[in-house]
Image: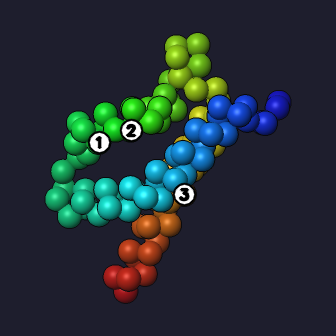
Amino acid sequence: MDFTLSEEQSALQAAAREYAQRRLPAIAQDIETTGEPPSHSLIAEFASHGFLGINIPEDLGGLAPKANARLAAALVRVSLDDDVRQQVANR
């Protein structure tokens, strides 16, 4: 199986990483503080960047499995890093 990303998939992965580093820590903090789920505007923002197709099969308009995994990893990595920092700060 070829795991090489296309130019478009690589650009999406880079955009996801940048977005996650810039936006997710504050979003996660807000959700933790308020206990409210993500707002509709946040979901629309996510969609505008093309991040909602990661769990939809490619034949239905979603992303290819290799792009799916790498995009999800780019988003989760920042989320996990922020969670670890918060746990350490709370000790």
Residue identifier under label 1: 42
CA gap, disc 3 to disc 1?
A: 19 Å
Q: Is residue 78 left or right of residue 6?
A: left
Name the residue at 24% across, 60% down.
Answer: 30
Instruction: Tell me the number on the disc at residue 46.
Output: 2
Structural distance between the alpha carbons of marks 2 and 1: 6 Å
Of the residues shown, which amino acid type is indicated by label 2?
A: Phe
- Amino acid carrying label 3: it is Arg
Residue pictured at 78% horizontal, 36% vertical: 3
Q: Earlier in the sequence, mark 3 or mark 1?
A: 1
Q: Are marks 2 and 1 in contact (CB under 8 Å)?
A: yes
Q: Is residue 43 above or below residue 25?
A: above
Badge 2: how crowded within 10 Å, few (<14), some, or many (20+)? some
Q: Is residue 60 visible?
A: yes
Find the distance from the CA under tag 3 to the CA under tag 2: 17 Å
Spot occupied by residue 76 in the image (x, y as percentages of width and height): 51, 53
The residue nearer to you, when weighing 40 against 31, is: 40
Question: Dot 3 corresponds to which residue?
Answer: 77
Q: Position of residue 17 (x, y in %)?
A: 54, 52
Position of the N terminus, as image quadrant, is top right
Q: Which structural element holds mark 2? A: helix
Picture layout, residue 67 above or below residue 88: above
Determine which of the numbered discs, if any, sits on residue 52 in the image: none
